[in-house]
Image (cartoon, helix red, strand yellow):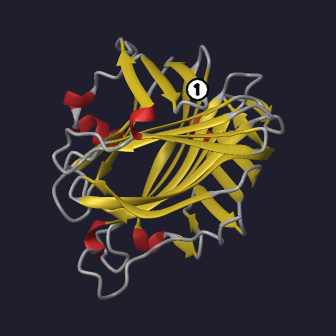
Amino acid sequence: MSAPDGLRPPSPFDPSAGAYKDWLHLNVLDHESGIVGLVNLSLHGDPGDERSRALGTALFHVPDAGWVGNVEVRGISEAALGPASIGLEQTGLAVHGGGTVLASARFPDDELVVELTATAAVPPIDVEERMPLSSGWVSWYVISRLAVSGVASVSGRRLDLGRASAYHDHNWGRWHWGEGVRWEWGCFLAPAPGPAFVLGRTRDSRHRIPEEPVLIVHFAGRRRTFRAAAVEIGFSGVLERRPRRLPGALAALHQDRTEPRLPRTLGVRADDGRDRVELEFTARAAAQVIAGDPVKPGYGFIH
């Protein structure tokens, strides 16, 4: 197991502190109901700058019903910060030890209340390398599978999460929204003890040439990593459903983004001459979270 993870705030003398970002992220997949969700707490900008912001996002998707949940935006000084935790009025996420994640969200007016604990079922992967991201960089800490306990109230329905799967990652780095940041990422989990897959690649500073993709597979107590030419990624079709767009004020400001051309199908093939993986993911819905940069004029659109 890696050493315990934690937030990575800039030092008081860091000239790039205005571009600081820190993200704590948890995905939940309930295989029986088909409900999937995320809880995400993030920091944007120099912690010592009153313009900087903290975002708490909790969104769950219910088949045949749509999205529930919302986003809260606070000044960074309003956030309760710990060594590996971010807490806001309605959302919170904390990481303890080598891989226990506590998450909560309370949006009763938006039909979502969640309280859960997720415990690592596989060792974490700590990528301290600074991967290029637009004009800045990003680093990554990931646990591809966690066991879950807890409950959620989703559209008035009580959901026992005891048989769900979860994924956790922590991203930190320096970048500004509005610079064409692009990071393609996904997690794909079969019910335990089946395999868990994590896919990722960034774009270079010109936003055109993709960096080498990586596909990580955890299965039967083993971890396999496919890189570069061993991984092929392809997109096809267009997801015709309009996304749920959040926060509402920024969504109203960006009416030109109401119909993003998102792919309907993602295909992944990985073959290193020893092992082979083929995945096909077909989207059924999307959400769009809009992040405004606190220092420079610009916005990021996360789907």
Rendered view: 48 above or below 122: below
Question: Which residue was labeled with disc 1?
Answer: 276
Residue 159 at x, y percent in the picture: 78, 33
Rendered view: 3 above or below 70: below
Q: How many marks?
A: 1
Q: Nearer the viewer, residue 179 or 205?
A: 205
Q: Residue at x 59, y 76 (%)?
A: 83
- Disc 1 marks which amino acid? Arg
Residue 211 at x, y percent in the picture: 31, 44
Q: Quadrant of the N terminus?
A: bottom right
Q: Nearer the viewer, residue 110 or 230?
A: 230
Q: Residue at x 55, y 22 (%)?
A: 279
Residue 99 at x, y percent in the picture: 71, 60
In which image quadrant can residue 12 be found? bottom left
Residue 13 at x, y percent in the picture: 29, 88
Q: Residue at x 57, y 71 (%)?
A: 6
Rendered view: 66 above or below 118: above
Q: Quadrant of the C terminus?
A: top left
Can the viewer see residue 241? Answer: yes
Could you say whether the residue bearing mark 1 is in a helix, strand or loop? strand
Q: Nearer the viewer, residue 212 or 284?
A: 212
Q: Residue at x 26, y 71 (%)?
A: 18
Instruction: Indicate left or right for 302 with 205 as reference.
Output: right
Can the viewer see residue 43? Answer: no
Structural crowding at the residue carrying mark 1, measured as other residues with C-alpha within 10 Å and reported as few (<14), some (14–19) or many (≥20): few
